């Protein structure tokens, strides 16, 4: 799972900093944080550093943001994982709004809307992968 | 608990890195990394652009056939227009030349396209344009012949160098004579021995014999001297190159 995440982050960072003008990395990071809390904090840290390096931002800026998201998500993880989609949506909306405001100085509502839609898809995929890996690791062998 | 500790450490590391970078202390670390990041980004960018172009081409695949057809049509139209422009340019040049010629304003000139040059000159203008037999034909201010045959839409012109046209002329020194064709040359004859005839003298129509006056015939290029003959003769060279003529002007009213 970790290697898949590292690859995904690397791929998303490359795309976002070269061809796609949409914050896909922060969407992935937020979804990961919402789903797994602090489980992959090292991946988030590395992704943040890589993002700063590729985007030409001050080193540590994005990783700090990602880690704070992960920390906050872990604090409210029980509420979010209890099936209350509203909590997740509110959390993600705050994250995307904050990200836009901090990193670009503006808040574009349509972009937040699209980000939420992509997040919904990503959350579903991450959940499926998590279920699959859990299932395969707990399989009994004779 | 351990995770919270670890995240606190990572947050502290991130914060420290941010502070160091903000103060320009991470330049030594970042600079070598740039050499890896930049080519990688460049490659991804080039690929992304190529992909977007590919998608754009693939998306417009159905319209390629239409575009090709349109291109063919446009090429054809362009060729036709270029040809038309060339023809018009040549015609314009001829008209400019004609307008620049010092001809009397009473002359009514009818332009005609040359369609054949052999013993006679054939032009694509006839009775419809008001051309009648006997009209003088000029290029610029130089007379080249006389209309000898006219149909509804075309005319035949007897050339001074080829035909049987006889034109009364005078030279710049006042010598008078008759210009006619002789062995494919324009020759001035019937010039009295006492009249001066020199090389490079210009020869003009005298206005007699039904021809308009002061039309240039050419320059004397060779003088045939004979003490026994009554008249002097000289060969005239016309400034008009007949083989490359495309438009001539017919004086329909003088």
Image (spheres, rainbow, N blue to C red):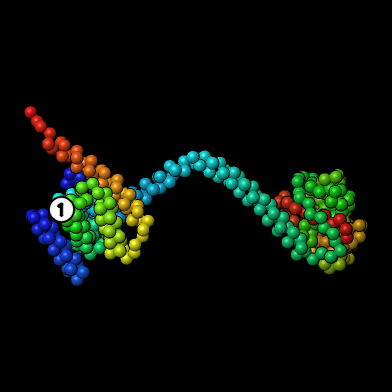
Please name whichever residue, A140 or A6, is drawn nearer the observer in this view of the structure: A140
Where does the C terminus of chain A fall, quadrant-wise? Answer: top left
Image check: B171 left or right of A15?
A: right
The image quarter containing residue B2 is bottom left
- Label 1 resides on the chain identified as A
Structural crowding at the residue carrying mark 1, measured as other residues with C-alpha within 10 Å and reported as few (<14), some (14–19) or many (≥20): many
Q: Which residue is rendered at x = 91% and y = 57% of the image? A: B210
- Image position, residue B244 (x, y; %): 71, 51
- Image position, residue B30 (x, y; %): 20, 62
Question: Is any part of residue B121 visible from this angle?
Answer: no
Please name whichever residue, A95 or A8, is drawn nearer the observer in this view of the structure: A95
Residue underneath mark 1:
A38
Q: Secondary structure at mark 1?
A: loop
Q: Which residue is rendered at x = 88% and y = 65% of the image? A: B194
Q: Which residue is rendered at x = 54% and y = 41% of the image? A: B66
Where does the N terminus of chain A fall, quadrant-wise? Answer: top left
Q: Which residue is rendered at x = 81% and y = 49% of the image? A: B125
- Image position, residue B37 (x, y; %): 24, 56
Please name whichever residue, B17 or B137, is drawn nearer the observer in this view of the structure: B17
Image check: B130 left or right of A1?
A: right
């Amino acid at each position: 799972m970790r290697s898949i995440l590292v690859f995904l982050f690397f791929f998303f960072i490359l795309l976002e900093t070269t061809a796609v003008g949409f914050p896909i990395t922060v969407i992935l990071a937020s979804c990961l944080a919402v789903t797994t809390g602090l489980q992959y904090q090292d991946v988030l840290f590395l992704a943040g550093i890589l993002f700063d390096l590729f985007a030409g931002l001050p080193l540590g800026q994005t990783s700090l943001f990602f880690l704070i998201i992960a920390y906050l998500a872990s604090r409210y993880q029980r509420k979010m994982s209890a099936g209350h989609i509203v909590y997740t949506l509110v959390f993600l909306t705050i994250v995307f709004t904050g990200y836009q405001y901090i990193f670009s100085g503006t808040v574009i509502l349509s972009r937040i809307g699209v980000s939420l839609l992509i997040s919904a898809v990503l959350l579903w995929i991450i959940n499926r992968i998590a279920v699959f890996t859990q299932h395969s690791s707990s399989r009994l062998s004779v | 608990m351990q995770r919270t500790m670890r995240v606190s450490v990572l947050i502290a590391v991130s914060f420290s890195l941010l502070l160091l970078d903000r103060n320009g202390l991470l330049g030594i670390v970042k600079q070598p990394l740039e050499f890896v990041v930049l080519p990688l980004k460049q490659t991804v960018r080039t690929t992304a652009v190529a992909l977007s172009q590919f998608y754009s081409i693939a998306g417009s695949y159905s319209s390629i056939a239409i575009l090709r057809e349109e291109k063919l049509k446009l090429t054809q139209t362009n060729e036709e227009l270029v040809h038309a422009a060339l023809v018009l340019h040549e015609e314009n040049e001829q008209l400019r030349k004609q307008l620049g010629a010092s001809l009397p304003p009473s002359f009514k000139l009818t332009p005609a396209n040359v369609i054949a040059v052999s013993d006679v000159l054939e032009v694509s203008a006839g009775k419809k344009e008001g051309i009648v037999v006997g009209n003088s034909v000029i290029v610029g201010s130089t007379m080249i012949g006389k209309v000898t045959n006219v149909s509804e839409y075309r005319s035949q012109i007897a050339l001074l160098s080829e035909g049987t046209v006889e034109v009364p002329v005078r030279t710049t020194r006042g010598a008078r004579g008759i210009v006619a064709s002789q062995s494919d040359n324009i020759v001035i004859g019937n010039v009295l021995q006492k009249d001066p005839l020199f090389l490079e003298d210009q020869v003009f129509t005298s206005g007699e014999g039904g021809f308009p006056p002061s039309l240039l015939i050419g320059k004397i290029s060779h003088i045939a001297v004979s003490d026994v003959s009554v008249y002097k003769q000289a060969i005239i060279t016309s400034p008009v190159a007949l083989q490359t003529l495309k438009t001539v002007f017919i004086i329909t009213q003088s």
